[in-house]
């Protein structure tokens, strides 16, 4: 949003308070580029200078300052030996996932190998729990609903309804 301070060239409404803006009064103008239906235009909002400040202060009251640490969150302090074991588990997990992906890319994947590698992944997940826990990326992702089945059942129900009529 582009914000400018100027004098009102025409009468209008304040975007924050019910008091109208009169001609020649100081005003804060905010312009935002908007595109809809293949056309580009600007959305314009106007405020009294004091209303603009009040709106900003109200936002700051609702969203208090919380200092954030920069960088990624640190693990609890582990001894050097445990850190090395954790790194070894992380590497073995990455290697195992890479082998699973390589096996799945084959025209005829060996399901016994995939089962063995899947067991190894589960073993690594339990093994890393003693060394700071598993990373978030290791957590299983929630299953998304299968919309194809719903569509197929909707088509079947539509066909059944049509045949009954």
Image: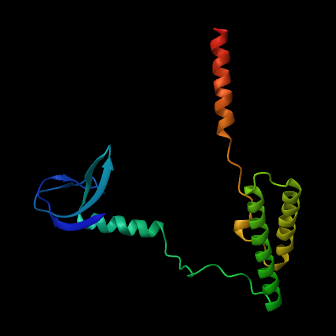
**Residue 143 in the image: x percent, y percent?**
71, 49
Q: Quadrant of residue 120?
A: bottom right
Q: Quadrant of residue 111?
A: bottom right
Position of residue 119 relative to residue 76, above or below, is above
- Side of 165 relative to 101 (left or right): left
Q: Which residue is depicted at the point 71% across and 57% down?
A: 141
Q: Quadrant of residue 27?
A: bottom left
**Residue 42 in the image: x percent, y percent?**
25, 54
The quarter in which the C terminus is drawn is top right
**Residue 96 in the image: x percent, y percent?**
79, 68
The front one of 59 and 84 is: 84
Position of residue 143 relative to residue 75, above or below, is above
Q: Which residue is depicted at the point 75% across and 87% down?
A: 77
Coloring scheme used: rainbow
Q: Which residue is depicted at the point 22% across and 67% down?
A: 4
Q: Which residue is depicted at the point 68% across and 43% down?
A: 145
The front one of 140 and 23 is: 140
Looking at the image, which residue sits at the far bottom? 80
**Residue 139 in the image: x percent, y percent?**
74, 63
- Side of 49 relative to 150 (left or right): left
């Amino acid at each position: 949003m582009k914000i400018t301070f100027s004098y009102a060239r025409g009468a209008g409404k304040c975007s924050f308070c019910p008091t109208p803006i009169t001609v020649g009064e100081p005003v804060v103008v905010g312009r935002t580029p908007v595109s809809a239906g293949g056309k580009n235009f600007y959305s314009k909002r106007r405020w009294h200078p004091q209303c603009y400040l009040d709106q900003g202060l109200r936002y700051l009251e609702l969203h208090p300052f919380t200092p954030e640490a920069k960088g990624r969150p640190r693990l609890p302090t582990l001894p050097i030996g445990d850190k090395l074991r954790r790194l070894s588990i992380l590497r073995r997990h990455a290697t195992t996932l890479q082998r699973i992906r390589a096996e799945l890319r084959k025209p005829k994947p060996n399901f016994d190998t995939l089962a063995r590698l899947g067991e190894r992944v589960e073993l690594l997940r339990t093994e890393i729990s003693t060394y700071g826990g598993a990373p978030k990326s290791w957590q299983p992702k929630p299953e998304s609903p299968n919309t194809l089945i719903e569509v197929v059942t909707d088509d079947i129900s539509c066909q059944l309804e049509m045949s009954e009529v």
